[in-house]
Image (cartoon, rainbow, N blue to C red):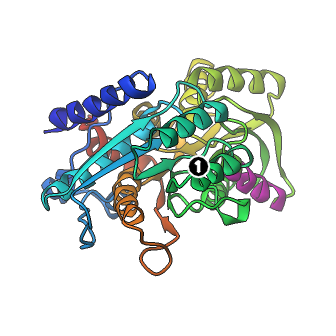
Amino acid sequence: MIFERFCKISLLFYMAFIFIGCEPKQSSYNFSSNEMEKNAAYGDVVKGAVNFERSLDGYRAKKDKYYFYFTYKIVHPWWDAVAIGLEDAVSQFEEYGVSIYYDYLAPSYVSPKEQESRIVNATASGVYDVIGVDVADVDYMAPVINRAIDKGQKVMTFSSSDCGKENGCRRVAYVGNTHNYNDGIDLAEALCKRLHYIGKIALLVGSKGVPCHEDRALGVKSVIKKYPKMGISFIGYDDDSAENAYNLTMRALQEFPEIKGIVCCNMSNPVGAARYIVQAKQTENVVIVGMDHDQEALRFLDQGVIYALGIQDCYSIGFDTIQVAVKIADGLLPPDSFPEKTEEVTTVIYQKDAAQMLQVLYGEEIE
């Protein structure tokens, strides 16, 4: 079933490739919505981190066909997980005789200009009931989204980065992480406690201008300021690249050997940081905390190389994005018909949870 599901998603990517010109990518993310039901032994932390048992909320769609366009920041396994939630919601709508067709596309690097081009082209096509945007840069994208709306296009935001009224953006609604700042706080607090509130740290942010990365970094900085014996010696942007994160970690520790901890604000940088820490034989000296469910990062967590990971419920982000997009397409508006912001959860997990999470998400058994 998992293979068939990914084949279907890949076919959608391929069809979109013909229209827009983006190379399709298949995920290695391998969870099943039946996984929790099969194994009741999973702890409450793991069960609460990702909600696989989702059902449509009972809304009766007004049409029997919908066409959506979703563009996200960068081709990366994080968004492959979101795609599983998208596809499951689509499958459930099919059971009620509602067909949903969608393009789900991103560039190979974070680029607001590339995102603008995709939105302009999708709007000009006149094909799509709703365009969904995972915002690459708030200041750049707010006027782009507003121009699409001025042309009569319905636009929502989704995933991990919003662009709302507070930014001068008139998007209809947002589905995703509404608490990135607090996620940064939670990770920093976990690190500070582990270090007994003494020590210098490095901060790996992600991509410049990306709201979720920048907000998490702000949350981290707010925590470090609270503790007189803590400080930030190094800040680096890795552009969502594990290889760049590896090199930044090497540079940070060479320039500032006093560093005792690293906070990683996206899914790629804890992997790169952990790879370097292992190679440099610094696992006993440097504590790493970071974001999300990368398989290699979870293995590092299980081995104790990474201390804590903040896991976002990507599945629910995808599932709820489809539900909200259908309502927007039907002309419904928040807050009467659905929330302006649909909030999804982030759960901080530790070494004791890693093996179960690997089993749930990837079917990987840890001996």
Give how far across and how far down residue 344 sits, in percent.
Answer: 46, 62
Residue 135 horizontal side relative to residue 314, left or right: right
Q: Is residue 283 visible?
A: no
Observer-nearest residue: 361 or 273? 361
Image vertical order of residue 352 relative to residue 329, above or below: above
Give yes or no for residue 222 being in the magenta stretch. Answer: yes
Observer-nearest residue: 153 or 96? 153
Give how far across and how far down residue 55 sits, in percent.
Answer: 23, 65
Q: Which residue is mark 1?
A: 148
Q: Residues within 10 Å of mark 1 (few under 14, many from 20)?
A: many
Give how far across and how far down residue 363 sits, in percent.
Answer: 23, 38
Residue at image location 42% in from the left, 72% down from the top: 332
Residue at image location 13% in from the left, 58% down from the top: 97
Q: What span is colored magenta in the figure? A: 215-226
Observer-nearest residue: 46 or 192? 46
Residue 130 horizontal side relative to residue 26, left or right: right
Quarter of the image containing the N terminus? top left
Residue 322 horizontal side relative to residue 292, left or right: left
Q: Is residue 79 visible?
A: yes
Give yes or no for residue 218 being in the magenta stretch. Answer: yes
Q: Secondary structure at mark 1?
A: helix
Secondary structure character of the magenta stretch overall: helix
Say which quarter of the image contains residue 316: bottom left
Say which quarter of the image contains residue 6: top left
